[in-house]
Amino acid sequence: RVSITDGKCCYNLFSPNKKKYLRDNIFTNFMSVQGKTWGPMIYKSLQLYKTHYDYSIYPMILQDIKPKTIIELGSGNGSSAIWMNDLCKSFEINTAIFSLEIEDIKPILKEKSLYRELVDINFIQGDAYEIETFFPKEFLEKLDHPWLIIEDCHHNTYDIMVYFHKFLKKNDYIIIEDPDEIDTGNELEGLSL
């Protein structure tokens, strides 16, 4: 049995070696696109690792909760934050987007001439293992609710969720896209808050 992910990594839950990843190219390519096309979807010339399910679900979530703040943990190349920013604008939702990634993705966006996106979205270079450093209590307490928190960094999921849980209010949402217990060693891994 395999946990279904967005195709970047697939964890074999019943492997005797619990740290073994399935990286079969055919399987991961299929999972990354959920059978829609061969290869990841492209949005504004960037690979967007979302499935066609995500293309349906995220717009509904955004229209339903109308988040004032979106916190995305795991920017990748920035395409997901850019897509959500464009969706929010099209739905006339005024939202602040903060997107954390361990690598500096601003050069990628400049190379693709996505300058407006650099102004509209707060891309933060930082480590998910030091979440309190990049999203300190004082900062979080000033952010408008409702929040939409998207954990897609694949690291430290449990500790991240425990940390943010202290600041959540009614109507805030957390989406855990690809939980991965390997990096934390915690068997509960974020799904048992």
Image: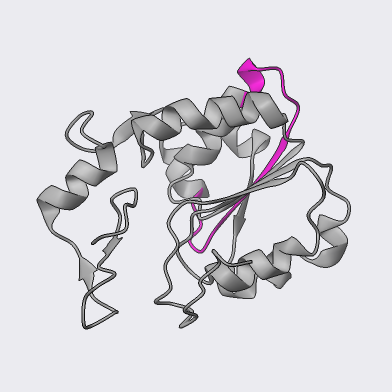
Q: Look at the image and give the residue range highlighted in magenta.
A: 88-105
Left or right of 113 on screen, residue 88: right
Colouring scheme applied when the structure was drawn = one colour
* Residue 170 percent coordinates (x, y): 81, 46
Against 92, is 140 above or below?
below
Residue sitting at 49 percent across and 43 percent down?
A: 78
Quadrant that contains the N terminus: bottom left
* Residue 77 percent coordinates (x, y): 43, 47
Left or right of 11 on screen, residue 125: right
In which quarter of the view is residue 38 placed?
top left
Against 73, is 136 above or below?
below
The answer to whether residue 114 of the structure is visible from this angle is no
Residue sitting at 29 percent across and 69 percent down?
A: 13
Left or right of 24 on screen, residue 160: right
The answer to whether residue 78 of the structure is visible from this angle is yes
Against 83, is 189 above or below?
below
Left or right of 188 on screen, residue 71: right
* Residue 171 percent coordinates (x, y): 76, 41
* Residue 71 percent coordinates (x, y): 65, 49
Residue sitting at 48 percent across and 69 percent down?
A: 155
Quadrant that contains the C terminus: bottom right
Residue sitting at 28 percent across and 50 percent down?
A: 7
Foreground pick, 79 / 178: 178
Find out whether residue 167 is within the magenta segment: no
Tell me how many marks there are: 0
